[in-house]
Image: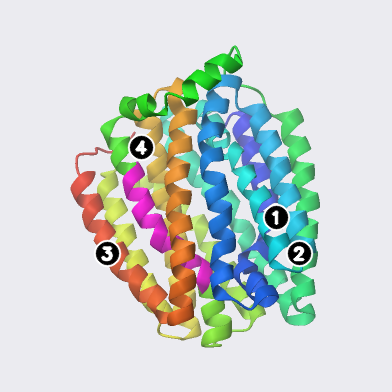
């Protein structure tokens, strides 16, 4: 039986994803339509990540010093406000303002994952975090179709409506989380202790298990190429090669998201295998998926999205299980903030790199990603080969 906190977090994450999934998957298209620039389309999410990275560090320390619940509710509210700002944006300045607020919302991500860890038993880690990915992404079986339909029918105004509805729903979810979650940390909440802890980030890094330090470095490298790949595929498929309409892209997103359901039974199998073997295999499949996109056919585009979704869900679950296994409870918030920092630092590099690559030659995005994901599989096999199955 899952803890009440996990049920609340998973169910609310489902609703948040359902609302975010209408317009946000088309953010690159939305920015490109408003500004006419693929470079700005890359700079907007780059801004989100760069603003969010220091907030992830602060959020991790806040989660450990003051508890998980309040920071989760506050960050969820910021996310809702950012979506409202996107909905009224008509120029780059409003887009950057929305990106800034969205970056601030990252403060709650470490607390969210730390509360999941605190509320799970050790043998549940892989399954719980696989469920987290499933409930966060299965709404994409429905909502991107609506977003694509709105874009085709009403243009940019249709996406604005999606952002507006998302903002309202996410603000409501913030209240639900405030009154439904229970705290798992007994903390003094002393601001002096918090300030002292933040000043000792270097000491926290030294205290990390070597496996976690390697994983953090690897995630920066890998996420650079994956974020670039995910973010610009919609522009490539709908504008550059024009193999799908926006509604068809939404349908592909929906169909590929349906395969997230398969990751749960797969996770029950792979948790008994060496994590590194599964991780390496997933990266090689993601490299293949990148190549499939360049074939410029609808069915290969669908196949690539299916592979990327399944592989991404399983690698996420493996990484979180490794963190939970090698980190004591009192440091999970801080370690999770470092994991998130590595993710968003890599994403920021990927967005800005992808914007320039797309401007030069869109296909270079997918060829570059395929090469470096294959290289990443070699690095994973070298640096994490000592890991044993996590049971």
Under circle 2, the secondary element is loop
Query: Is 224 part of what is drawn in magenta?
Result: yes
Q: Nearer the viewer, residue 123 or 172?
A: 172
Q: Position of residue 120 (x, y in %)?
A: 50, 29
Label 4 belongs to which residue?
322
Q: Which comes sooner in the sequence, label 2 or label 4?
A: 2
Q: Position of residue 40 (x, y in %)?
A: 58, 69
Q: Which comes sooner in the sequence, label 1 or label 3?
A: 1
Q: Which comes sooner in the sequence, label 1 or label 4?
A: 1
Residue 83 seen from this side? yes
Q: Which comes sooner in the sequence, label 2 or label 3?
A: 2
Q: Position of residue 244 (x, y in %)?
A: 58, 84
The region drawn magenta spans: 216-232
Residues under labels 2 and 3: Cα distance? 39 Å
Q: Which comes sooner in the sequence, label 3 or label 4?
A: 4
Q: Is residue 242 above or below residue 281?
A: below
Q: Residue furthest front?
A: 93
Give the residue displayed 48% in from the left and 56% down from the top.
Answer: 348
> Alpha-carbon neighbours of circle 1 within 10 Å: few (<14), some, or many (≥20)?
some
């Amino acid at each position: 039986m899952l803890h009440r906190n996990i049920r609340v977090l998973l169910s609310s994450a489902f609703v948040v994803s359902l609302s975010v999934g209408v317009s946000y998957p088309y953010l690159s298209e939305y920015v490109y339509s408003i500004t006419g620039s693929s470079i700005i389309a890359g700079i907007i999410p780059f801004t989100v990540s760069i603003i969010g990275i220091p907030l992830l560090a602060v959020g991790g320390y806040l989660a450990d010093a003051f508890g998980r619940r309040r920071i989760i509710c506050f960050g969820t509210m910021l996310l809702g406000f950012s979506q409202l700002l996107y909905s009224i944006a008509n120029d780059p300045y409003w887009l950057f303002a929305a990106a800034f607020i969205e970056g601030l919302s990252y403060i709650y991500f470490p607390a969210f994952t730390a509360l999941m860890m605190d509320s799970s038993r050790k043998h549940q880690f892989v399954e719980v975090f696989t469920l987290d990915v499933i409930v966060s992404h299965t709404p994409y079986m429905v909502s991107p179709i609506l977003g694509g339909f709105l874009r085709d029918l009403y243009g940019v105004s249709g996406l604005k409506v999606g952002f507006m509805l998302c903002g309202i729903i996410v603000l409501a979810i913030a209240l639900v989380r405030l009154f439904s979650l229970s705290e798992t940390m007994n903390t003094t909440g002393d601001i002096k202790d918090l300030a002292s802890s933040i000043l000792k980030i270097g000491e926290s890094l030294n205290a990390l298990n070597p496996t976690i330090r390697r994983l953090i470095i690897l995630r920066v490298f890998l996420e650079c190429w994956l974020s670039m790949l995910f973010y610009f595929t919609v522009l490539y498929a709908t504008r550059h090669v024009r193999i799908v309409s926006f509604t068809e892209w939404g349908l592909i997103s929906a169909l590929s998201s349906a395969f997230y359901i398969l990751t749960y039974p797969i996770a029950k199998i792979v948790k008994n295998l060496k994590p590194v073997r599964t991780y390496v295999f997933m990266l090689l499949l993601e490299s293949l998926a990148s190549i499939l996109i360049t074939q410029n056919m609808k069915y290969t585009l669908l196949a690539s999205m299916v592979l990327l979704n399944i592989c991404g869900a399983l690698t996420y679950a493996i990484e979180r299980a490794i963190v939970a296994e090698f980190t004591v409870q009192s440091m999970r918030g801080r370690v999770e903030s470092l994991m998130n920092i590595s993710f968003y630092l890599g994403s920021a590099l990927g967005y800005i790199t992808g914007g320039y690559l797309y401007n030069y030659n869109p296909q270079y995005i997918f060829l570059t990603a395929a090469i470096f994901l294959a290289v990443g599989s070699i690095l994973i096999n070298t640096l994490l080969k000592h890991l044993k199955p996590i049971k």
